Amino acid sequence: MIVGSTFVSLCFMGSIASIFPRNCGKIFSYTGKKNQNTIHSLKKSKSQGHHYQCKDYSNHTLRIRKKYLCATCSGLLTGAILGIIGSIWYFSGYLQVEIIPILTFLGAVGVFFGLFQSIIPKTKGPVSRFFAGILLVLGTYILLVNLDQVRNSTFVDLFFISNSIFWIFTKINLSQREHKITCSNCSAKQCYN
């Protein structure tokens, strides 16, 4: 039960982070201080979600009616909700799963695509980013369930969950890197760079 509770807690915290990405961006900033030359400083510019309202960021946002949402954060939120539901079903015993090797492969592919979508050619649109967010969380969930079936070890499962936290930080770091490159190549005068 501790494994399920830990994964559900991680998904819940991820949900909060995906709903309030600007606040979490300040917390998880690798610089450790507020820097006026980074993407986290959006005070004076117009933004869409937590992205600049700029043609270079149009592939980062989904427009739903008149509201702009970050495609990746929306996918991570959706994946986290599905991960919470799946974890409650599985770890409470309502979902019986057999070990299917193809699921392990699909989970690994989901995690890989979720992490590295932004550097895979022709996968930079908002729909790809949305599904990459979902697949990162669901791939992690699938791998956790399969690992739990094979090893049935609380220690191994918790070690795996701690690795998935590293994956989240990797995703954040790759995203911040991509944003810095995008802004550094921009010639607009209203941005900070």
Image (cartoon, grey):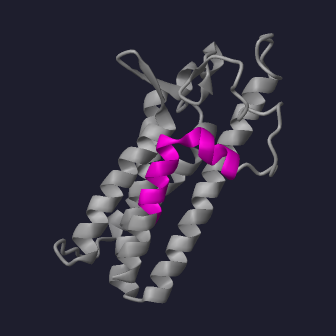
Dominant secondary structure (helix, strand or loop) of the stretch shown in magenta: helix
- Residue appearing at x 45%, y 46% in the figure: 76
Regarding residue 112, the answer to whether it shows in the image is yes
- Give the percent coordinates (x, y) of residue 30: 77, 51
- Where residue 97 appears, x then y in whole percent? 22, 74
Dividing the picture into quadrants, the one containing residue 175 is top right
Q: Can residue 105 be found in the magenta stretch?
A: no
What is the number of callouts on the image?
Answer: 0
Horizontal placement of 167 versus 183: left or right? left
Between 140 and 169, which is closer to the camera in this rendering? Answer: 169
Query: For the magenta stretch, what is the residue range?
Result: 10-27
Compared with 69, 144 (above or below) is: below
Magenta stretch holds residue 16:
yes
Answer with the quarter of the image where residue 63 lies. top left
Give the vertical position of 74 relative to 147 (above or below).
above
> Which residue in the rendered view is the most extreme toward the front?
43
* x and y, in percent, of residue 11 in the image: 43, 59
32 sits left or right of 83 in the view? right
Q: Is residue 103 above or below residue 91?
A: above
Q: Residue at x 42, y 50 (%)?
A: 135
Query: As displayed, is residue 50 above or below residue 86?
Result: above
Q: Quadrant of the N terminus?
A: bottom left
Which residue is located at x 25 percent, y 72 percent? 90
On-image quarter of the C terminus: top right
Question: Is residue 114 toward the left or the right of residue 152 in the image?
Answer: right
